[in-house]
Image (cartoon, rainbow, N blue to C red):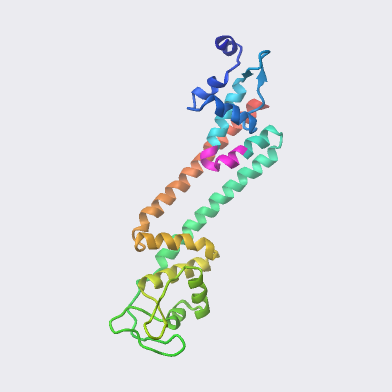
Amino acid sequence: MGENLQSRGRLRPVDLARGHGLSTQAIRNYEEAGILPVAERTPHGYRTYTPLHAAALRAFLALVPGHGHQTATSIMRAVHQDAADEAFRLIDESHAQLLDDHRTLQAVERALRDLEPTATRSEPDAEPASPSPLSGSADTFIGPLADRLDIRPATLRKWERAGLVRPRRAPGTGYRLYGEADVRDAQLTHQLRRGGYLLEQIAPLITQVRAAGGLEPLEAALHDWHGRLSARGRAMLTGAAELETYLRERG
């Protein structure tokens, strides 16, 4: 039966699945999800597909790397519901998200470049008064750090509540002591806030900086980030080409 179907331009689920390392159940699931057009049935109830279904499958699989499985599914479903404008809107949203991710990466890189090495401070200031830090310490207090960043001490306290800075407390007085890593985190937070990023968007980066032990080890992560964004962009182009081919074949 398989040879007769293929000779008439008809394909079985296994014919679609085989070339993409998929199961026949996956093909049936894709049809039920609207990723593929509805298949015709033989008199015995077997699904039969056509080269058009194969083109739809190629388009979907090409869309997934750039747009993600959920969005790619929604794009194909919109196409099969004759809602091309909705499909194009979804594609535009993915491109907008990619652009926003590029801008986020650029902002992070600018923030990292702008960070200055933390110098040992000799002009201590109190949190409410003016105590002196421990001799030989690189710690600074909330007042001098706020002045350096040109922000209010209350802003630093807000960042602390959000987990973005984690100053120690001075023994006996309880005043906040910001070490080099704390100053680094505060500077990075400040740069990203100036770029319009929310505290909840900044928190994952601060966590990564801490896990890496500083800024230099993040170079590899930033390089990888660049690579992943470029790969997404190329995948979107590939997906667009396959979708355009499918739309032409579909008519």
Residue 70 belongs to magenta span: yes
> As rendered, which of 66 and 71 lies closer to the eye?
71
Q: Considering only vertical position in the picture, is 101 above or below 161? A: above
Classify residue 184 by image quadrant: bottom left
Magenta-drawn segment: 64-73
Residue 145 horizontal side relative to residue 17, left or right: left
Residue 149 horizontal side relative to residue 214, left or right: right
Residue 26: x and y, percent?
55, 29
Residue 114 horizontal side relative to residue 248, left or right: left
Count of picture labels: 0
Residue at 60% from the left image edge and 31% from the top image edge: 30
> As rendered, which of 21 and 241 lies closer to the eye?
21
Residue 180 belongs to magenta span: no
Q: Considering only vertical position in the picture, is 185 above or below 78? A: below
Quadrant including the C terminus: top right
Residue 82: x and y, percent?
71, 34
Residue 103 horizontal side relative to residue 82, left or right: left
- Of all residues, the one furthest to the front in this rendering is 172
